[in-house]
Structures are given as C-alpha cells and as structure tokens.
Amino acid sequence: MKNKKGISTIAYFFLVIVLLFVFSIIFGLGIYASNQVNTALMSVEGDVGSVNFQNATAATWGQMNSGLNNSANLIGAGLMFAMFIGMLINAFLTRGENVKIFIIVDIVILLVAFLFSTYISNAYEEIIQISDLSTTFQQTMNMGSSFMLNLPLYVLIFGILIMVISYSGIPASREEQVAGY
C-alpha cells in the first residue's frame, strides 16, 4: 500500500478525531430521538381498529428502542476503538516507507492533534452537560462518552504506538513483498 497522498499516518488523527466527534454526537442524538419517539408513542391511549396502540408500539418500536439502548454502549465504544485499530493496521502496512527524518514532523503533528483533541473533548463535555441530553450520553452511552472525554489521552497513546510501528524498521516478509503491501 503506497501512501501516494503524501500524508503521514499520524496526520490521519485529525480525520479520526473529527469523525469520532461527529459520530458520537449523531449517534447520541439518534438514541435521544428514538427514546422521545418511544415515549410519545407509548403515551397514546386507545385502540386503532381492533389493535391496542400501546401494545403494538411495545411489540414493535419498543423492542427496537430497548435493543438500541442496551447495545448503544458497545456500538459506540466499538466503532471508536475500531477507528484507532484501523490506524494501527495502516501504520503496520506502510512501515518502512517513511523517511526517518519525518519523525520530527510526526511529533509536531501529534502535539497539534493532542491540542485539537483537547478542544474536541471539551466541546463534547459541554454538549453532554445539556440537561435533556445528559441521560442519553452519560447513562446509555457511558463507554463512548468516557472514550470521548479521555480522547487526548487516547490520541497520545495511539499516536506513540503508531509512530513506533511506522518507524521501527520491521522488515516486510516475503509474502508481503509478493502481495505488494
């Protein structure tokens, strides 16, 4: 895999940080909206034809909503962690292609990414402090929220790991050379 764009692996942190923020906010707002719709549908009393509306809602939308609320924690944290694992795999596949002097540039990029992730983490904290959204973000998505609130720490840890993998000089195996990695 050739890095033809001239972007170092460490520079992808900016893209991942923005994607994590946008994904977390959209996912949390989706869960919030689903809970609001479920509450509104369950408050409707009466029958529609020969079907009780509350029973029909509990059997259909209510099942989907409870499944979403039960799995939101793992979905959010899993996708966030998967983005960082993807960056580690990218660093492994592009190892040896970076000139060793670029480590200085990568350290500067990592420091800027750390500062950027601090701002994103603080913005996320402000958003989850909104009273209507606090239950959704702090209880339903607590793993994803803790991941976002500790984002600067994760950026530093994964950035150092990626730099070690990228610049460690691990030689490519014969199979990788034949396959063209």
Image: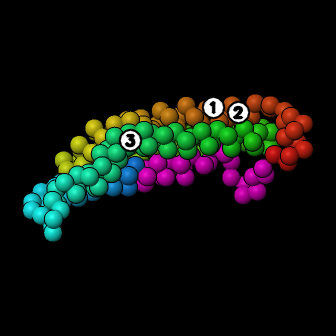
Task: Tell me the element at label 1.
Answer: helix
Q: Which mark is residue 71?
A: 3
The amino acid sitting under disc 2 is: Ile
User: Who is closer to the viewer here, 74 or 106?
Assistant: 74
The amino acid sitting under disc 3 is: Ser
Q: Are marks 1 and 2 in contact (CB under 8 Å)?
A: yes
- Residue beneath the point at 47% across and 32% down: 153
Q: In this figure, which residue is indicated by the disc labeled 1?
A: 161
Q: Which mark is residue 165?
A: 2
The crowd level at tag 1 (other Cα within 10 Å; few <14, some 14-19, many 20+) is some
Mark sitting earlier along the chain (3/2): 3
62 in magenta? no
Q: Which SS does the magenta portion mostly show?
A: helix
Image spot of residue 52 (x, y percent): 15, 59
Magenta part of the chain = 1-23
User: Who is closer to the viewer here, 95 or 69?
Assistant: 69
Task: Tell me the element at label 3.
Answer: helix
State the separation of the CA atoms marked 3 and 2. 33 Å
The amino acid sitting under disc 1 is: Leu
Q: Is residue 26 left or right of residue 87?
A: left
Question: Quick one: which residue is furthest to the front in this view?
Answer: 50
The crowd level at tag 2 (other Cα within 10 Å; few <14, some 14-19, many 20+) is many
- Residue beneath the point at 30% across and 49% down: 63
State the separation of the CA atoms marked 3 and 1. 29 Å
Q: Is residue 113 above or below residue 29?
A: above
Q: Is residue 141 left or right of residue 21?
A: left
